[in-house]
Image (spheres, rainbow, N blue to C red):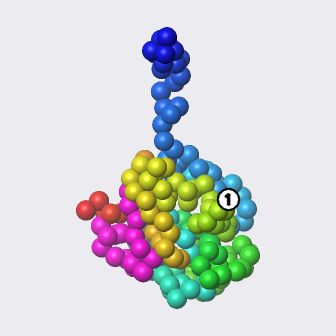
Amino acid sequence: MKTIIFLTLSVLIPAGVFAQKNFHDFEVNDINGNPVKLSDFKGKKVLVVNVASKCGLTPQYAQLQELYEKYKDKNFVIIAFPANNFLEQEPGTNAEIKEFCTVNYGVTFPVMSKISVKGKDISTLYEWLTKKENNGVTDAPVQWNFQKFMINENGEFAGFANPKESPLSEKITGWIEGK
């Protein structure tokens, strides 16, 4: 009887219902509070970075902007997520963060609303990014501000780089260039 039920369900339930989520299945809010479907980035490689304005690694904003300028016309985008999870190094409001990024670093890549990247209030996107059971590849808990996650054109987890690794490193630029 169990076999009949299983076979019946496998025929009646469409393929993919039990498939694992990917990056494109999420929706977030941009820095202005507007919804953004990550499916809008299908066909692009995406570098997801948790950022903070009062961190020793904050100068990486300049390198991120340089990387974005170099590759933005080659199916690549950076998406920044401000987070206040590490020593309260991102205490600002979304408006303050937006002004900081624009005035100090000329940021033109997408910056989203402030979220949590770890702990009991971790965002669902970061739950997916950091846990192998969700992303299907590896556990990659966020160690600090400016951890970088690489997402391929199909919305699949492709790897990550530690916070201190430069956005201009061979690991990241080689991935973008398909090396």
Q: Quadrant of the C terminus?
A: bottom left
Q: Residue 110 sits in which quadrant?
A: bottom right
Residue in the image at 38% along x and 61% along y: 159
89, 61: nearer the viewer: 89
Where is residue 163? Give x, y as percent: 45, 76
Where is residue 1? Give x, y as percent: 49, 11
Magenta-highlighted residues: 158-174
Label 1 sits on residue: 29
Q: Residue 28 sits in which quadrant?
A: bottom right
Residue, far left: 179
Where is residue 128? Give x, y as percent: 52, 54
Residue in the image at 63% along x and 51% along y: 27
37, 73: nearer the viewer: 37
Q: Secondary structure at mark 1?
A: strand
Residue in the image at 42% along x and 80% along y: 164
Q: Is residue 86 left or right of residue 60?
A: right
- Tell me if residue 167 is in the magenta stretch: yes
From the viewer's perspective, is residue 14 above or below residue 35?
A: above
From the viewer's perspective, is residue 29 above or below residue 142?
A: above
Where is residue 38? Give x, y as percent: 56, 52
How packed is label 1: few (under 14 Cα within 10 Å), some, or many (20 or more)? some
Query: At label 1, which amino acid type do we have?
Result: Asn
Q: Is residue 45 visible?
A: no
97, 67: nearer the viewer: 97
